[in-house]
Amino acid sequence: CNPATLYGAAKDALRRTVSAAAKLDGVSVGWGRIFSVYGPHEPQQRLVPSIAVPLLRGEPAACGEGIVERDFLHVEDLASALSLVLDSQLEGPINLASGECVPLKEIMVALAKIIGRADLLRIGAHPPRTSEPQRLAATTGILKAALGFTSQYGLQDGLAQTVSWWTKWLATGGESHQRRVEGPST
């Protein structure tokens, strides 16, 4: 809980405020700190669909260098972790993550291999974001030891499951349905 960014400081300030207010009412607060999540139904601007969807369409997938490192957790595993936190009496911050930090390039390449279109992956096409921390890694000792959490999905299995979902979504016209509901993108 030593935030290095203004965003992180704001989230930690909220945690401290909620915890202080809860103590006044005798309520415990287990604060789930969610790291990078992926899986079905993500907005297409997020990393995994921004690579998978163009590749599934047979189009180039432009991305950055992929040198920053993040700790990714499949959305179904996140749901399980949140459920464990809610059912527990633990107090304080609890990292909800896999405990494995990987360079984004590893995820990009894995997606391209799963889809079979590494030829369309354009690593380095986007400039780096200089404001992002180089590494966001989670320690998951409390989640795993105190709550007994184990991931259902390893990164490769989770990415494969997510690609399968996006494949079905594209095949059933999900994109045209989304445009009808949300309107055209600008």
Image (cartoon, rainbow, N blue to C red):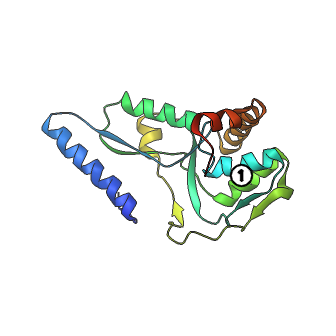
- Residue at left offset 46%, top offset 51%: 139
| Furthest-top residue in this view | 87
Left or right position of 170 against 93: right
Kind of element beneath mark 1: helix
Left or right position of 99 against 184: left
Q: Nearer the viewer, residue 47 or 45?
A: 45
- Residue at left offset 56%, top offset 37%: 75
Instruction: Residue 177 in the image: state x and y as whole percent.
Output: 67, 32
Q: Nearer the viewer, residue 176 or 105?
A: 176
Left or right position of 115 against 36: right
Instruction: Residue 47 in the image: state x and y as whole percent.
Output: 63, 52
Compared with residue 90, is residue 125 higher up or lower down, i.e. above or below? below
- Residue at left offset 66%, top offset 63%: 66
Q: Is residue 78 visible?
A: yes
Q: Nearer the viewer, residue 147 or 135?
A: 135
| Furthest-left residue in this view | 24
Q: Is residue 114 visible?
A: no
Is the residue marked by circle 1 packed among few (<14), some (14-19), or many (20+) residues within 10 Å? many
> Quarter holding the N terminus?
bottom left
- Residue at left offset 35%, top offset 53%: 11
- In this figure, what is the number of numbered marks? 1
Instruction: Residue 8 in the image: state x and y as whole percent.
Output: 38, 58
Quarter of the view holding residue 151:
top right
Q: What kind of residue is marked 1?
A: Ile
Instruction: Residue 169 in the image: state x and y as whole percent.
Output: 71, 33
Residue underneath mark 1? 51
Left or right position of 124 against 101: right
Quarter of the view holding residue 60:
bottom right
